[in-house]
Image (cartoon, grey):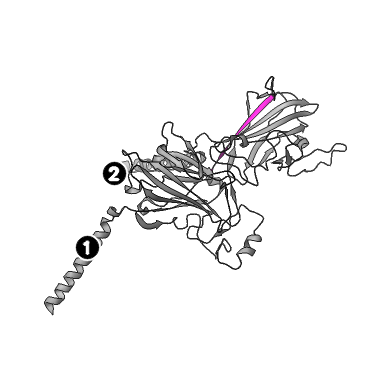
Amino acid sequence: MGPLFLPMIRSVSKFISFTILLLFGLACTSFTATEAYDPLDPSGNITIKWDIISWTPDGYVAVVTIYNFQKYRHIQAPGWSLGWTWAKKEVIWNMVGGQATEQGDCSKFKTTIPHCCKKNPTVVDLLPGTPYNQQITNCCKGGVLASWVQDPANAVGSFQLSVGQAGTTNKTVRAPKNLTLNAPGPGYTCGRANIVKPTKFVTADKRRVTQAMMTWNVTCTYSQFLAQKTPTCCVSLSSFYNDTVVPCPACSCGCQSNATHPGSCVEPDSPYLASVVSASSKNSYTPLVRCTNHMCPIRVHWHVKLNYKEYWRVKVTVTNFNYRMNYSDWNLVVQHPNFDNLTQSFSFNYKSITPYATINDTAMLWGLKFYNDLLMQAGPLGNVQSELLFRKDQATFTFDKGWAFPRRIYFNGDNCVMPPPDAYPWLPNSGFRQYTSLLTLIMTSLSTAALMYVHA
């Protein structure tokens, strides 16, 4: 019987191995598809609308509008850049409110030279101060877009372009392909252009409504894994009831390695600091940070400061360790169960974010305009801070087991590295293990002394 069942056992074993391999492959595929999902802003995205507002003899005139529908992730300087590939042999005759970064080869045109002849153009926003005859609504911000919660009026950008050598009807025109959005670096993945219901425009006097000839819609989602290989911020903790300051985990954003990455950090007391910063590379996206154990450009410190009868107080400090960047219009997103009873934020703006319907445990904090909305580069002025006053809910409030510390913190939309829970500051009465160890040491010493006395 044994030899008869041996081939069957081998077949079953191979089938099980193949099944496990197949499931592993499917799991990897599913992880890749969900990398852009943000649990605190599940519907956040950047939507690009391409509205054809009129036809021309050889193409059309379109208004392209970029909407930042992300609650707390903004696009900072040097701003967005939008690229695509033409479906046919289109050219851009002229633009208003934006410009192509390269003109391309326009040698076949003899009289009127197009603004851009590239098959895959890249467009950027114009800078503030552009002459009015070159502007349209929501343009000319240097590519900077605010987050939807902080400033929805400035979370929109747009430009107008006249396209030639394209279709002149809804049936012959073709949507651009392979749209790419850099804001300012990588991180966004854009879907295909879909035909949607034409956009309607209301005139300034609100007495007339016009409609686009055709509208394409593109949705772009953000992934922190695509934006950078390592995290960009970390969290440290402390409290009034424990002298221990829990630092950021070591190597949170990288490790000091002069052998493999020379010049990746600089000491604050280095005599060459000024020359290193002024001679920084043209790629300003690469941070030059102060040498620390965590090597993060940003550190957020949460300090449980005071305990009252009905309230408790926290101090939040954001420190910039990056010598190459000032963070304008920065923001924090903090998750803690007591945010449903936040009484006052002393020098930060505050807005509740409820990603889970009625559960109010997430808050967005950002600086006050012209006061602390600019986080300066690393140095004596490279920090902002505020205090938060919470009302206690006697049913849930406790200082035990790290309850007073945040569950997660985002800086400018990127998830920060938290210390491990077992490293959180303990309450004094939670030090039973230390007292036990001390008692054991005393008893051992007394026993040793007694034995020495007996044998003396």
Residue 377, located in which quarter of the rendered image?
bottom right
Seen as rendered, the residue at the extreme front is: 309
Q: In terms of depth relative to the viewer, which is nearer, 13 or 431?
A: 431
Q: Is residue 374 left or right of residue 391?
A: right
Q: In terms of depth relative to the viewer, which is nearer, 187 or 149?
A: 149
Image location of residue 399, percent across then percent down: 33, 47
Residue 2 numbered mark, or none: 2
Image location of residue 100, percent across then percent down: 73, 41
How far, Cα to Cα, is label 1 from label 2? Answer: 64 Å
Residue 114, located in which quarter of the rendered image?
top right
Query: SS of the residue at dot 1?
Result: helix
Query: SS of the residue at dot 2?
Result: helix
Amino acid at pointer 1 = Leu
- Observer able to see residue 157: yes
Please identify, in this view, whether the residue under mark 1 or under mark 2 is nearer the observer: 1
Amino acid at pointer 2 = Gly
Is residue 219 placed above or below 314 in the rendered structure? above
Seen as rendered, the residue at the extreme right is: 111
Q: Residue at x 67, y 22 (%)?
A: 206
Residue span colored magenta:
213-223
Is residue 243 placed above or below 10 in the rendered structure? below
Residue 439 numbered mark, or none: 1
Q: Residue at x 42, y 35 (%)?
A: 360
Based on the picture, tell me whether residue 219 belongs to the magenta stretch.
yes
Q: Residue at x 70, y 31 (%)?
A: 63
Residue 275, located in which quarter of the rendered image?
bottom right
Number of numbered discs: 2
1 or 2: tag closer to the N-terminus: 2
Q: In terms of depth relative to the viewer, which is nearer, 144 or 191?
A: 144
For the N terminus, the quadrant is: top left
Q: Is residue 232 left or right of residue 106?
A: left
Image location of residue 320, percent across then percent down: 54, 54
